[in-house]
Image: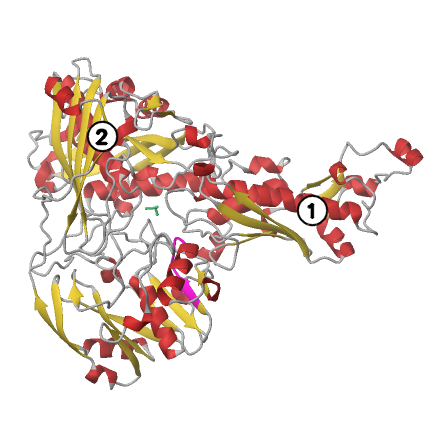
Amino acid sequence: MAIGNLPNAADIIGTGVPRIDGSLKTSGTARYALDHDLPRLVHAVAVQSTIGHGRIRSLDATKAEKMPGVLLVLHHGNMSDAYRLVSEQSAGRTNEARPPFADDKIAYWGQFIAAVVAETLEQANAAADAIAITYDADDPDVEYDLSNFDGPRPSSWLRGDPDKALAEAPVVVDETYSTPVETHNPMEMHGTVADWDGENLTLYESSQGVVNHRNVMAAVLGIPRENVRVISRFIGSGFGGKLFPWPQSTIAAAASIKLQRPVKMSVDRRMMFSNVGHRPHTQQRIRLGANKDGKLTAIRHDFFSQTSINDDFVEHCGEQTPFLYSCPNLVVTTGMVRRNVGAPAPMRGPGAVPGLFALESAMDELAIKLNMDPVELRLMNDSERDEGTNKPFSSRHLKECYTTGAEKIGWKKRTPEVGSMRRDGKVIGWGVAGASWAAARVPCTASVELCQNGRVCVRCATQDIGTGTYTIFAQVAHAETGVPLDRIDVFLGDTGLPEGPTSGGSMVTSAILPAATDASKTAVKRMLQIAATTPGSPFHGAKAEHLELTAGLIRTTSQSPVQGVALEKGEFTPTRETMQGIPFAEILRIADLSGVSATGRTHPSFEDENARKYSLHSYGCHFAEVEWEPEMARLRVSRIFSVFDCGRIINTKAGTNQILGAAVMGVGMALFEQTHYEPQRGQPINGNFADYLVTTCADLPDLNVTFLDYPDLIVNEYGARGIGEIGMAGVAPAITSAVYHATGVRVRSLPIRIEDLLQSKVLSA
Ligand code: MOS
């Protein structure tokens, strides 16, 4: 690839470098967790509860235990010695607070109640079916309406007097919006291969955070951290569902320890809907008060978020509300409502995505009430300062996102009347919504080694969940050493490497840049020192600061002493050879060193006094176009223009991919995705890809992504902020607002259904 020969290696930052791991994935050579078929491997299969609430009255495994190949059956009667409870403060975060098989209680349909381990997968499956279970069943509570709730309603972000301001406001919007349970459906499902050798435990996982996973599992199993290694070299994505360990990891590890053999346990697609997290259902009442000219005077955001029986999980829908708009009177309140469902988990843009569906839908409704353009309304209420924390923004260009997006779609041509825009025999509708997501610089260490074989090795125990982290590291190493990308090896996803961050919160890129840069610079400095001090080196006797490493070659710089003068003083004299450059590998050979390495560190923004003075967030917006054919009730999202202010973009290709993928998930949220719980047993009845609809290629609109590319130097020296989650925020409300514009139907409860659209009074195109 020509990139390696760029005149200035630093120019690689900000270009669209293809994934360095791309060919490993497309050729099937990348090994995922469950690809690790170790010698003597045995298989664990889960037995799931067929009731949604109650107790296990009896569990009889005697028949199963006698079946061919069966080695072990784990259940609440024999599991308790295998694990300990962990606290988040001392160990790390798990998804389910209750350890697997802790007691006879059933809190949700599909809960793992036993696991069978056998020589083959078929034997384990057959034995799992032979376990006889009886229950004392209670009615599960999977009631959809969350408002019938009398638990605590903590409030936050209170400023001014929102109730008084609402009572006095000449224009008020007061509506309730709801988003359903959505299930994470990455291509690669969860799974563990656990390998206990009598002293050390190795876990091959599909994890967004190997370091947290190691720390939690060490604590759960009572093994020193030093004896646990977690490996996730390739991950078929996670979207938040793989941030923290799930029970299959504990079960596989406990079985491996008991049997002294490697154990594989996988979570199948159906289990993805019950056992390993989901974005919880939310119900949000938004009240907006405004003057007749459109200036916001009050915002009340009262939301309920559903959680499981055992886990305190809140989908923080109000996180963006305090700073997105300027408004003197504001409050957010929360209600955590328990249902008999599995533990929720963060899912791409947790809080912001459902929260902004509600807030941005309400803003569109306010614009209509005011007879104002929805872009105008947002520009007029834009905030100069974070009024929630009373801090200045590090860098906010949301207004420019709106004006750029409006330009791209041709917003000036929009006529606001419902059903007034037509094209090619279809009614079209245009809608817009804003997006925001927090930025931070989380701690990270990474090492860079210049090796005697002429290659550069970069090492960090973060992981690439499919977003391009391998490539970002390689870009930095190339920028700092000039070594071509095909001679840079990046090692990630292994707790044996220097400690790196969890791939969560869209914070990895901004975290790894300082550490990787620091490590590269120090390694280069050490290399030059070796060149200058090693007897026999052509640079021997030179001052290290007069040497440089470019394109992988060490050479004398123009600052080196001029030949004649130096000779007189008996100093080092540059030669034609040292001016042209000598491969660093050559110097390492002369010095008889295998390599020279250095570790770099990223200091977190929360410990940085300057960064703490600012409100750190990314911003953006989506303009969506829908096509509505009333004669056949056919709705399509036809175009989305996304404009994002995420700081400086390090890799335009990977960055654009993030927003494209997020927009696709946003289309799914608007039109298709909902996990349905059947009321008698609480079973997710559409827990498969035939019944749970996701966006397919046939559903895809034309997608168009623009980055404003303003560096945010408060976050790090590259100016890069996060980019993964924000792209999903704002998609659904832009689409429902476009649907309103086309059909006159306001959908406040996602996903949009044909039944909703049949209410439209726009009867022909
Ligand atoms: Mo993200 S929901 O922190 O993977």
Kind of residue sitting beneath label 2 = Glu
Q: Residue furthest right?
A: 568
Q: Which residue is mark 2?
A: 360
Question: Residue 526, which numbered label?
Answer: 1
Q: Is residue 6 above or below residue 677?
A: above
Residue 429 against residue 204 in the figure, above or below: above
| Alpha-carbon span between mark 1 and mark 2 | 53 Å
Q: Position of residue 135 (x, y in %)?
A: 10, 70
Count neighbours of disc 2 (C-alpha within 10 A) and say few if under 14, some if 14 to 19, many if 20 or more: many
Residue name at image x 45 percent, y 31 percent: 611
Secondary structure type for disc 1:
helix
Q: Which residues are magenta?
A: 202-209
Q: Earlier in the sequence, mark 1 or mark 2?
A: 2
Query: CB atoms at circles 1 and 2 under 8 Å apart?
Result: no
Q: Percent x, y for residue 455?
A: 64, 53
The structure's colour scheme is secondary structure
* Residue 415 rendering spot, x and y as whole percentages: 19, 19
The number of numbered badges drawn on the structure is 2
